[in-house]
Image (cartoon, rainbow, N blue to C red):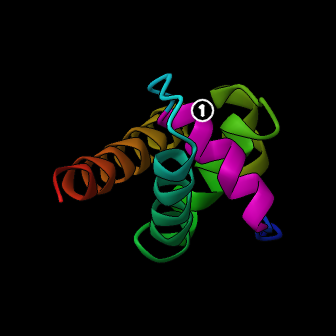
């Protein structure tokens, strides 16, 4: 079963990056820098499937079982995609935070 790709705008990437990387920083330039970095990472570092699962889970607040049904995947596969995407984004954030 084919499904439509989840479209990802800059605003939706901001929301995902905020949900994944909310350190409570009050430094506005630092937060904006991190959002830009994570936006690029979401668009270029994740696979299409990871991006789909991550955005459905965080933006549309879908449960893993519902994502699995919509994409025609098993629940464990969806969980692995979400976990892998989060790990990649945290790795990117940690790398650039040290610079």
**In the depicted view, which residue is nearer to us: 59 or 35?**
35
Res 23 → quadrant: top left
Can you give x and y, in whole percent of width and height, for residue 84 in the image? 35, 47
Can you give x and y, in whole percent of width and height, for residue 31 in the image? 52, 45
Name the dominant secondary structure of the magenta segment.
helix
Tell whether position 17 is magenta.
Answer: yes
Q: Which residues are magenta?
A: 8-21
Can you give x and y, in whole percent of width and height, for residue 97 in the image? 26, 50
Residue 54 vs 1, above or below: the answer is above
Question: Which image quarter is the N terminus in?
Answer: bottom right
Residue 53 vs 39, above or below: the answer is above
Residue 57 vs 5, above or below: the answer is above
Q: Residue at x 60, y 38 (%)?
A: 18
Tell whether position 3 is magenta.
Answer: no
Question: Which image quarter is the C terminus in?
Answer: bottom left
**40 left or right of 67 in image:** left
**For the view shown, which residue lies furthest in the bottom direction?**
44
**Circle 1 Cα neighbour tier, 10 Å, few/some/many (<14 / 14–19 / ≥20):** few
**13 left or right of 81 in image:** right
Q: Residue at x 74, y 66 (%)?
A: 10
Question: Quick one: SS at disc 1?
Answer: helix
Residue corresponding to mark 1: 19
**Residue 11 in view:** yes
Can you give x and y, in whole percent of width and height, for residue 38 in the image? 48, 58
**4 left or right of 68 in image:** right
């Amino acid at each position: 079963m084919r499904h439509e790709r989840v479209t990802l705008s800059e605003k939706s990437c901001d929301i995902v990056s905020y949900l994944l990387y909310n350190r409570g920083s009050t430094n506005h330039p630092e937060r904006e820098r991190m959002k830009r970095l994570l936006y690029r990472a979401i668009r270029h570092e994740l696979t299409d499937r990871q991006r789909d699962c991550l955005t459905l889970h965080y933006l549309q607040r879908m449960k893993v079982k519902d994502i699995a049904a919509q994409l025609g995947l098993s629940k464990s596969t969806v969980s692995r995609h979400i976990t892998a995407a989060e790990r990649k984004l945290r790795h990117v954030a940690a790398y650039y935070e040290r610079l």
